Image (cartoon, rainbow, N blue to C red):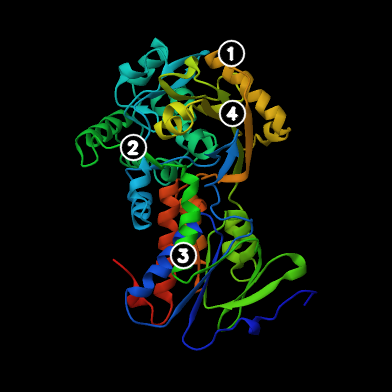
């Protein structure tokens, strides 16, 4: 034991207390902790002690607020998919329903051949349900190729999204529609991403040899006539989605959970009866015993922490790659006519631009425009998988690149009165072909009482991460004596 190391027995609570560590204080870990503390009132049983260990100074992970030109703004994820239940359910449970907001009814666009085209509506991750909606964005020849879908035999297993769509509908659909949409989710490349994980509905069609165009039309019809018809697709919170973690942390503390920041976890060891978790700065490491551990970290740190307790799972997770990206937020003085009527644009990789998307935040979010009527905020994102060289420049250089690309698309903009660069190193996991099977094998190789959750496993969106964290918590409870009855339906 080195200097500053605290022995485990200083922390041992003993008795009937079941101790659960949640490693990682992003939205997955916080959701796992919320599920665990919520189980306390579900049934009688042993007392549950929940500790969240987060390495950074704040909780929230990719949900973060920061100050730009004197205003607090989202510099990470800014919205959730409202038609998935997990995020909206959590928001309601936290008593934040009255702060829920939705985007303005303005459309986005896609860049093609140097100009903006309306983003086609009712596509299935870029596969159009209406061929006329993509004319202009695609050339007449490309639309003709799309219309003449080349049906292929049913597939077995997994394939890459981009390659499969290209074989069926032509390269232009992959390059100009699928690529920019998937890049906004994964910061990856469609020809390397898993169809099974990234677009399950298209994977189902592929397995059965069905038409992708018919599948997209059926999905559009279901969306138009289903229970969610007419409801907003996306949602956020007044004041920014990044305000969610602090509310969640406060309510966790009210329910008796321990949430510790600046406590990077350095080792997880398994003994015959418990897990020993070492955390903290190198000069003040603390080892604490727990009965169960939820690892809510990206794949790479999870792999490092699992080397001793679950080496087979660690080896599998170490193969999961990730993409780095940056979000550049700009503040401009007054309204900007060039941005009016649009929520932003997507950039296919075929275009000679560095940014991959831009959001006109003050147009997209009415609450932001109401709060700061004398400012226009917008943001641009850059960085794709295996293209990290773009980000190896100063913040000032990235701001300059964003401004030049924006000027190319929308025309000259006023000089910004404020700018902020948020770098997300290794922030987005890449679902390579076969990813679902890899995750299943990794989970099967974990010992009892040790579970994983987060974007690397079950989906990268905020609702998926919330669902993954809560599912991980329930999985832990099913393995702990006396807690099975606590599970909520």
Q: Residues within 10 Å of mark 2 (few under 14, many from 20)?
A: some
Tell me the number on the disc at residue 252: 3
Q: Distance between the residues labelled 2 and 1?
A: 32 Å
Task: Report helix, strand or loop for mark 1.
Answer: loop
Q: Quadrant of the C terminus?
A: bottom left
Which tag, 4 or 2, sits closer to the chain's start? 2
Instruction: Tell me if 216 is positioned left or right of 336 in this view.
Output: left
Q: Name the residue under label 1.
A: 412
Task: Report helix, strand or loop for mark 3.
Answer: helix
49 lies above or below 133? below
Farthest-out residue, bottom: 15
Q: Name the residue under label 4.
A: 330
- Frontmost of labels 4 and 2 is 4
- Residue 262 visible in the displayed image: yes
Counting from the top left corner in percent of width and height, residue 484 is at 36, 76
- Residue drawn at 27 percent across, 35 percent down: 219
Tell me the number on the disc at residue 233: 2
- Residue drawn at 47 percent across, 27 percent down: 373
Farthest-out residue, right: 3
Q: Given contact means CB atoms under 8 Å apart, are the residues at marks 2 and 1 in contact?
A: no
Farthest-out residue, top: 140
């Amino acid at each position: 034991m080195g200097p500053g190391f605290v022995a485990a027995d200083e922390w041992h609570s003993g008795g009937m207390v079941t101790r659960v560590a949640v490693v990682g204080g992003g939205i997955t870990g916080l959701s796992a902790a919320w599920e665990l503390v919520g189980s306390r009132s579900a049934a009688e049983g042993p007392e549950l002690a929940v500790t969240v260990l987060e390495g950074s100074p704040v909780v929230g992970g990719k949900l973060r607020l920061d100050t730009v030109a004197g205003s607090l703004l989202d510099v990470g994820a800014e919205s959730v998919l409202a038609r998935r239940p997990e995020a909206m359910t959590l928001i309601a449970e936290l008593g934040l329903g009255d702060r829920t907001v939705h985007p303005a009814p303005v459309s986005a666009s896609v860049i093609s051949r140097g100009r903006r085209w309306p983003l086609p509506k009712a596509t299935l991750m870029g596969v159009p349900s209406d061929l006329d909606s993509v004319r202009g964005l695609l050339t007449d020849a490309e639309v003709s190729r799309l219309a003449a879908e080349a049906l292929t035999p049913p597939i077995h297993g997994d394939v890459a999204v981009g390659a499969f769509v290209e074989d069926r509908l032509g390269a232009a659909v992959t390059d100009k529609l699928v690529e920019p949409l998937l890049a906004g989710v994964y910061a990856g490349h469609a020809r390397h991403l898993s169809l099974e994980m990234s677009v399950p509905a298209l994977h189902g069609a592929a397995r059965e040899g069905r038409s992708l165009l018919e599948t997209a039309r059926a999905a559009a019809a279901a969306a138009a006539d289903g229970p969610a018809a007419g409801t907003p697709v996306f949602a956020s919170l007044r004041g920014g989605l990044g305000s969610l973690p602090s509310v969640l942390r406060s309510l966790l503390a009210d329910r008796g959970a321990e949430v510790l920041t600046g406590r990077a976890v350095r080792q997880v060891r398994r003994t015959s009866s418990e897990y020993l978790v070492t955390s903290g700065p190198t000069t003040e490491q603390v080892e604490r015993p727990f009965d169960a551990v939820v690892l809510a970290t990206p794949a790479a740190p999870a792999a490092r922490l699992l080397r001793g307790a679950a080496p087979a799972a660690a080896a599998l997770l170490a193969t999961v790659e990730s993409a780095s990206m940056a979000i550049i937020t700009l503040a401009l003085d007054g309204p900007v006519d060039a941005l009016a009527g649009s929520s932003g644009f997507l950039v296919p990789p075929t275009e000679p631009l560095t940014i991959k998307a831009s959001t006109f935040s003050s147009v997209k979010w009415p609450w932001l425009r109401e709060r700061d009527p004398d400012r226009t905020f917008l943001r641009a994102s850059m960085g794709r998988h295996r293209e990290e060289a773009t980000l190896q420049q100063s913040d000032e250089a990235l701001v300059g690149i964003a401004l030049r690309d924006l000027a190319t698309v929308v025309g000259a903009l006023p000089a910004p009165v404020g700018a902020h660069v948020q770098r997300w190193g290794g922030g987005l996991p890449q679902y390579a072909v076969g990813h679902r099977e890899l995750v299943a094998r990794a989970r099967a190789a974990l010992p009892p009482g040790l579970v994983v959750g987060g974007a690397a496993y079950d989906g990268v969106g905020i609702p998926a991460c919330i669902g993954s964290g809560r599912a991980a918590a329930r999985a832990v409870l099913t393995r702990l004596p006396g807690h099975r009855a606590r599970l909520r339906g």
